[in-house]
Image: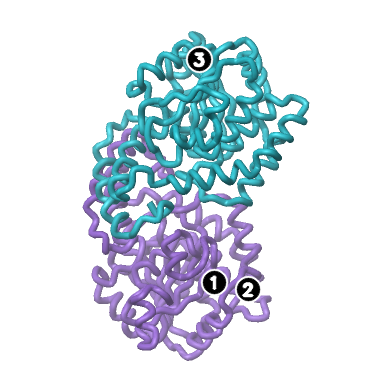
Chain colours: A cyan, B purple
Amino acid sequence: MRLCGSADADIFRALPRVMKSAEEFDQKLTPPEMAMCVHRIVREECKCADPYKAVKAKAIRAVLRREDSVKKTIESAANPFRSAVRFAIAGNALDFAIFDWSAMKFDEQLCSASEKFLDEAALDRLEAAVKAARTIMILGDNAGESVFDKLLIEQLSGKKIIYAVRGGPAINDTTMKDAEASGLDKVATLVSNGCDAPGTLLGRASEEFLGYFRSADLVISKGQGNYESLSAAPRKIFFLTQIKCAAVTRDLKGRIGDWIVAEGGADKTRQKNIKGHVL
Amino acid sequence: MRLCGSADADIFRALPRVMKSAEEFDQKLTPPEMAMCVHRIVREECKCADPYKAVKAKAIRAVLRREDSVKKTIESAANPFRSAVRFAIAGNALDFAIFDWSAMKFDEQLCSASEKFLDEAALDRLEAAVKAARTIMILGDNAGESVFDKLLIEQLSGKKIIYAVRGGPAINDTTMKDAEASGLDKVATLVSNGCDAPGTLLGRASEEFLGYFRSADLVISKGQGNYESLSAAPRKIFFLTQIKCAAVTRDLKGRIGDWIVAEGGADKTRQKNIKGHVL
């Protein structure tokens, strides 16, 4: 609420409502389900349907200013697809539920994108899955990040691409309007995931979303919120994310700040591990 | 609770109780008053009167191992008193409500103690106040930090020193037992502040504490919790602390990580500023 410029009076009205909501949470809810409840209260107390609108627009503009330069780096890389994957994960830093905007820190992320440690064997499997796929569904996360997703999609020529956005404002995540501002409508079929959670809740998703989700040859999920809500989903998914909290470090056996390419979903040999929270 | 080794079941029982308590907080309470309520619940759900006992003992041992070396640095400094003040502020990093224990990070704090930026004019005023005082009261904060307070007290020879500890376990703050483990009973009169808040609540303090607090020529308050509860106290106080949260950055016009020597309290010319949250 401070990030959105709310007055103290609004914040102090929201706080006890958020606490009451948190007190009553079913402890089996995923973090995006809890955040959905909290941010519905935030939007009511802000008296604003999309309080992070300006924050999102600023992030998208900041990435668009760097788009040409990043595109050149990708296109001149030995493997442009893998380079684009790396920038798509770098973009996951544009998460203003967690970080403050810092042009310096963001540019550090971009500078380190080509060298940052990634599981290269998982990247091999992702690259093979992309080659074999005709339809690819990408689940978007933060608004600024979606510009990098567009650059990744440009490396997926010849494929049918479906890009899923949040069904309504969810912190600084990509909605239909934000995806259009990033230019994603020119490279993908945009679909709403039907819900205003900062994640993907299959139980609340639209039939349109579920149709694509079931039938796509490959699903690539961006960010921690989608991971938290889909890590035990009933189909195979490739997750691209940065690790941002202690619970996910335990789940993915990594550290905060790690960049992740991980497979999860319905592969029978993996199902047990996924239920037990190890991908 | 994770730091204390609590089981998930205990944590998930405590969480809704903490939320309910937070929901009902009078928003005029100071952070230590709120933390007092929260940590009473934590102690009940841990089924342990002093859950951070092992954490405190470990921190005290870690500082005692470095005591001789720090003492030599202080005694060989051009101004041993000012050097001891610097280490007393360095020790404020041993706050396990906020930071994880890291020997490396702690040693970095000690290495930077002599050069870290401090308000030298405020240090001049503190030094003059010490020279003029016969009775000095020090309000302790974290258990590990109290070993450094002992080294500071050793630079106050010829003065009557009263060292105030928490009236009961309050996160990892110094209680009577912890102060004895640090060796403070050998250099100061120990007094309980009468309360299990991680701060100093004058409204809950014992008559013994208040007697010293009113009559001491000089009061030196350690740490953010004491600052939060005493920044508008009805007497002059010198605060030594590190800044650890956004609210205090606004209050003290500093940044997170800054080291602070600041005066607050009943000096008439300052009273107005203190009420308006600027020291």
Q: Which residue is located at x 39 percent, y 64 percent?
A: B225
Q: Are marks 2 and 3 on the same chain?
A: no
Q: Secondary structure at mark 2?
A: helix
Q: Nearer the viewer, mark 2 or mark 3?
A: 3
Q: Residues within 10 Å of mark 2 (few under 14, many from 20)?
A: many
Q: Amino acid at mark 1?
A: Leu
> For residue A236, which numbered disc appears in the image?
3
Q: Amino acid at mark 3?
A: Lys
Q: Which residue is mark 1?
A: B151
Q: Position of residue A171 (x, y in %)?
A: 41, 41
Q: Which residue is located at x 60 percent, y 32 percent?
A: A88
Mark 2 vs mark 1, CA separation in Å: 8 Å
Q: Which residue is mark 2?
A: B74
Q: Position of residue B10 (x, y in %)?
A: 31, 37
Determine if residue B183 is in view: yes
Q: Amino acid at mark 2?
A: Ile
Determine if residue A279 is in view: no
Q: Which residue is located at x 41 percent, y 19 percent?
A: A209
Residue B194 found in image quarter: bottom left
Q: Earlier in the sequence, mark 2 or mark 1?
A: 2
Q: Residues within 10 Å of mark 1 (few under 14, many from 20)?
A: many
Residue A97 vs residue B241, the one in the foreground: A97
Tally of numbered discs: 3
Chain holding disc 3: A
